[in-house]
Image (spheres, rainbow, N blue to C red):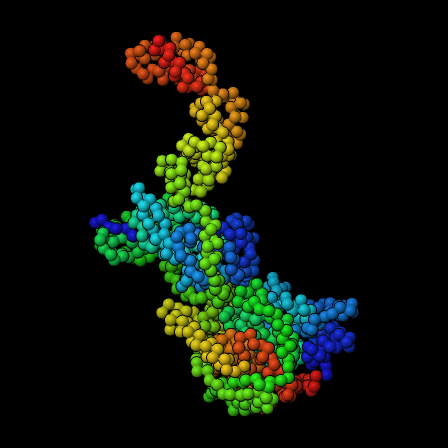
Amino acid sequence: MDREIIIGLETHVELKTKSKIFCSCSAQFGGEPNTNTCPRCLAMPGTLPVLNKQAVEFAMKAALALNCEILPFCVFDRKNYFYPDLPKGFQTSQYTYPLARNGYIDIKVNGKTRRIRINRIHLEDDAGKSIHEKNYSLVDLNRAGVPLIEIVTEPDIRSPEEARLYLEKLKAILEYTEVSDCRMEEGSLRCDANISLRPFGSDKLGTKTEIKNLNSFRSVQRGLEYEVWRQNQALDNGEEIVQETLQWDEDLGVTVPMRSKEEAHDYRYFPEPDLVPTVITEEWIEAVRSTIPELPDSRFKRFVEEYGLPEYDAEVLTASRPVADYYEACLKFCPDPKAVSNWVMVDLFALLKANNMELADCLISPENLGEMIKLIKEGTISSKIAKTVFEEMFKTGKTASTIVEEKGLVQISDEGELRALVERVVAESPKSVEDYKNGKKKALGFMVGQVMKETKGKANPQLVNKLLLEILDN
Amino acid sequence: MKLNELTAHRLHEMLINREVSARDITEAVFNRIDEVEDELKAYVRTTKDLAYQQAEEVDQKIQRGENIPPLAGIPIALKDNICTKGVHTTCSSKMLENFIPPYDATVVEKIKENSAVIVGKTNMDEFAMGSSTETSAFYPTKNPWDITRVPGGSSGGSAAAVAADETIVALGSDTGGSIRQPAAFCGVVGLKPTYGVVSRYGVVAYASSFDQVGTITKDVTDCALLLNVIAGHDSNDTTSVKREKVDYTKALIDNVKGLKIGVPKEYFAEGLDPEVEKAVLESVEVLKSMGAQCEEVSLPHLKYALPTYCIIAMAEASANMARYDGIRYGYRTPEASDLIELYKKTRSEGFGNEVKRRIMLGTYALSTGHYDAYYLKAQKVRTLIKQDFEEIFKKVDVLLAPVTPDVAFRLGEKVDDPLTMYLTDSLTVPANIAGLPAISIPCGFKEGMPIGLQILAKHFAEATLLQVAYTFERNTDFHRRKPNYKGQEGGKN
Ligand SMILES: [Zn+2]
């Protein structure tokens, strides 16, 4: 039986504020264990929280970028549970009144736009980290008190692929607003999923399971695909789905139930008496709204309209803000949108991927890439040579012209010099000439290749082509 | 009279006139501590070295001819739930027996800035949960008026220390009456300020929406002086209120003419000892004779005050106590085979019965299935009680009431009967529920034990409250009597 997939995602995102949400400790990632701590985030007796306004603003910024409405006040609740990396014995979160509600993200699935509604976004403090050794556990509280937002969707997602696309888009938007690094590997973006199946046409939701530990885009899709398969199997066998919390095991590729002890929580939420409500005025909201940059959707539209890029290019280039920024910076030095797009999307991405690097680590400045493309257009270097130059630029950070000069890579466009060479190649390739005359146009390519080989790729290929045709067709 | 028997304002005069040194005063206090502490047990720990060092600094200032603030060189005792940097802060609990805070509470910073001399940390009910100082994990404190009786609680150590002249002034904290009740039992002046007037930063939380630091002193003038020092907004405590600085000594006016006094009948309900009732009603007459106008008023929801307080305070306490898990500081069980056992043993061994009882009750009140019936309902009733007070204070300036249903009870009398014990707070919790300022001043005696008069005012009307208290004190003699405990001279200051 074919069943409809119903997925809702809960995403935790660490905000990259300067300091933690309720104390002045640095919120920077890393540091020796327990060095970014103070009496407040260690929950020493008598300490009280003081709300970091920047955390509220970052959360507001994210919420506005996700099309949410912001509540006129910011209040907190205590979420009670015991864990060694939770110093207060409760998490300071928002339960009854989240910071923001009723937003959405549009994603593109098979060329169609799908709207995934966001139910709520709330602000809370992160816990620390437990490090389990064989016979003991250690606790690092550097992350305890780092501000988090939790973004909860409506059950609008209809496939594991959509879940991944939603998450990618969410990450892009949050990166654009610069409120989070969204590094899944560092845990600054974490995702839990609720999933259930039901017969098509039914308006009743099936029993759901919750999957935790979906720590990469890949595992979001794989974990959900597995769970769809598992639930379908179970239902086909006439079994009931048990409402439970599962853990995704990336190595084994399966979901496994968490121990019931770990999920049997009654959080006993109640209003946090140590924090007075923070009033959020319309003026404040508007001030934050004015700091939101152009977001992926409108940038995509502009790239298509203004630069005449194919939708595919615009999509790839605007998926991440650093790439889009880089691309537009290159255009300042070389106003050829498609050429720049090709170099960035194809060559640069390939090298980054091969070297396991990020754009931020790239030594090629937009100015240098722009200059290199100009050298091609001016005929100073061939496209082929440009690949070599580009690799060298990537390795050394030198400008294209420096590399061309150092390595003597200037394109040979001197007709006299090339004509002599072309005549020689023609004379030495009677078989190819004959083939060509017999209509095998491929033979021409061979002879161009020979000339390029002789010149170590420096010959202007258009000119070689022209000269060959002249000589052969005479 | 001995120096340790005097008030802060009298000693301040003597200091600036160079009749005595801060060292002399400190010495007198420590001599008295040596004399009585073995029996009275008002302190958990004294800080003699720190005290003499602070006294020395004040003496040097005086010698240099510098101006000194009113509390400079004045010995002060701090309830042991107020964090002191480098000095054990135990909350009279095994859980924090070895806890040394790396920071000062804001009120301690202010005390130090004003050069008061910190004598020590006073005994209390464990984590301020109790009304007799008997739930202290260390020992009960005795009432200097009768050492077979309790000093009240939870700030029993502070009140007993002031009454027995083991300090000049003291700080306590008041969550449901923990300053006013022991002040009444020990015949001293105890003020719980409006919620938000004094910073709670560094004061170990019992029930966050009720806790408020306040003063325990020998008279109303010292109360105003100490309040001047500790009051004020603190950016470390967002529930502390931003207000213009008030000089509370300006409120010390011997005049209540035209002031409207309300006598809320619900405070005089069943269970109130007739002699206590008589003393309070006579106090009303005193103020009437001074020109105050009096009327009986009613607070219809007051009968729900105690259960409302219990539910919300214990709910908050259940979360506030969660941090004592044996992981980062405080007591940790020496043996546990896994995490759950570590939690269970640490908390079972580290907390006393009353703390456990309140954690359990509070946890229950917040649990799924009980939340609406208990916690939510209590919050609604809290609003109704607040509204009752708001209405009343449109008509009158202050309310007069007893502090406790009876005078100090005997050690051991109620400690095994929690419900009866909770009832001793029934007349003090309403001020905490509504966040109002309230003071207890001596207004009579029964069987040689002091009776307290409670005066309540609207939010931030500490000045009105002090004015009434001051006028009453100037025109009566109750505050002059001392317990006559181990050689106290008593008499006039
Ligand atoms: Zn911190």
Q: Is residue A83 above or below residue B66?
A: above
- With B331 as the anchor, is A60 left or right in this view? left
Image quarter of the N terminus of chain B? bottom right
Please, is residue B117 above or below residue A460 in the view? below
Q: In the image, residue A453 lies at what x, y percent? A: 43, 17
The residue lying at 45 percent from left, 58 percent from top is A282
Question: What percent of the width, then of the height, locates residue B451?
Answer: 57, 86
Q: Quadrant of the C terminus of chain B?
A: bottom right
Residue placed most toward the observer, A450 or A313: A313
Which residue is at 45% across, 75% downward? B382
Would residue B466 be visible to someone looking at this image?
A: yes
Q: Nearer the viewer, residue B431 or B146?
A: B431
Quarter-of-image position of residue B165: bottom right
Residue found 65% across the figure and 69% down from its top: B111
Left or right of B144, for residue B308: left
Q: How many marks?
A: 0
Determine whether, in the image, residue B249 is placed left or right of residue A288: right
Q: Position of residue B287 (x, y in %)?
A: 58, 88
- Residue B202 in view, yes or no: no
Furthest residue in direction left, as rendered: A1
Compared with residue A250, is residue A387 higher up or lower down, i.e. above or below? above
Residue occupying image coordinates x 43% and y 31%: A336
**Does residue A330 lie above or below B31 as drawn?**
above
* Residue A181 x/y as whole percent: 47, 47
